[in-house]
Each structure stands twice: as structure tokens, then as C-alpha cells.
Amino acid sequence: MTLLVLLVLISWQVAVDGPLLGVDTAVRDAVRQVRGALHSTLLNHLGVALSDLGGGVPAVPVLLGCAGLAAWLARRDGRPRWWIPVPVAVAAAVAIPLLVVPAKAWFARPGPFGLPLAADQWGWYPSGHTATSAIAYGTAALLLARVLPSSRARQVGWATVLLCAGVGTGLVWSDFHWLLDVLASWCLSGLLLLGLHRLLPRLDLR
């Protein structure tokens, strides 16, 4: 419920250009000041590299690879519906553009540089890279958690959280997205992953 309320609130503020968007401007300006003061080429390259981890490549191949591994481990354990991870991963990969692209086109929000959208641009809200990383890596972690020992599954889960946090941080640090773009995509992805978490046990993937 909290994720849904936050998503609706942020989306409403973006749609009406509300006062909450002042948070975005303040964060952008603060990040630029810190980035200028540090003047660190290493940090700037790291920010871009983390952002790139939210692209369709490598996120979707990682998702499909982890699904294949989960299916293989399930089959090795003798589970009757060992193949379930593969269609689940494909459905998650297909869901990403279906959820993000229409929203980007509808909100048509300009990016942190303040330039108007070109005719071939969809807009910045919500963040596609954030949603791609959270949904792809999150789904991969959920699938692996069903076939790995609990201790290893927790390690995979925490690694996934850190990875997705790194992607979001890199996007904001590099001026690729507003903070609220990232937060909204995390809310959207969290809702999808919570639904998937409840669905997987019903698919006999325990």
C-alpha cells in the first residue's frame, strides 16, 4: 500500500507540475555542486557505469540466464514444474517496456538539463533504466531464491538491492534522471515484484 500511495503521489505531482518537484531541483543542484567540488573523473565514470547496468543489455540477458539456472536447479531437484522460471522471466522482460514506455509518453517530462523534449523522445518519467534493473534483477533474485539454500538466497537478495540502488544513484549522479523518476520506478517495480513473490509459490516453485 505504501508503494502504491507513493507512486500515485509522485505521478500526480509530475502531472500537475506540483511543489514536490522542488525536491528534484534541490537534489539536482546539490549533486551538481558536490560533483563539481570533487571533480572526480573516477566517480563520474562509476556513475555512468552503474547507470548502464540498468539498460536492457545486460539486465535482460542476466534475467534470462538466471531463469535458466533456476530451471536447471529445479529439474535437478526433481521438481515437476521445473520449467516455470523461463516463462516467468520472459513475462517480466516483456512487462518492462509495456509498463514504462506508455507512462513516459503520457507524462512527457523533460530531463534534468531542462531542455524541451524532441519529437522522437518519450520523456524521463518514470526512469526506464531504474525499472529495467529493478524488475529484471529482482525477478532473477526471486527465481533463484526458490531453488537456492536460504543463506545463499539472502546473499543474492542483498546483492540485488545494492545493485539496483547503485543504478538509481548512478542515474541521479550523472544527471540522467530526476530523483523522483527513480523513486517512482522503484515503487512501480516493487509492486510488480511483490505480486510475483506471492504468485511463485502457487506455481509450485517452492
Image: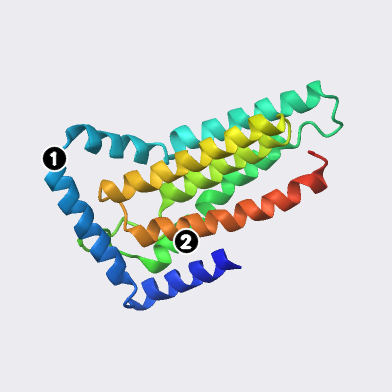
Q: Nearer the viewer, mark 2 or mark 1?
A: 1
Which residue occupies 29% across, 38% down?
A: 48
What kind of colouring is applied to the model shown? Answer: rainbow
Asked if the residues shown at circle 2 and circle 1 are in contact, with their CB atoms under 8 angstroms apart, the answer is no
Please report whichever mark, 2 or 1, sits nearer to the chain's N-terminal start: 1
Which residue occupies 19% across, 59% down?
A: 29
Within 10 angstroms of label 2, few (less than 14), some, or many (20 or more) residues? some
x, y percent for residue 9: 46, 73
x, y percent for residue 185: 47, 56
The image quadrant that residue 80 belongs to is: top right
Q: What residue did someone put label 1 on?
A: 39
Label 1 residue SS: loop
Q: Residue furthest front?
A: 151
The amino acid marked with disc number 1 is His
The image quadrant that residue 74 belongs to is: top right
Q: What residue did someone put label 2 on?
A: 102
Observer-nearest of 158 and 131: 158
Observer-nearest of 61 and 43: 43
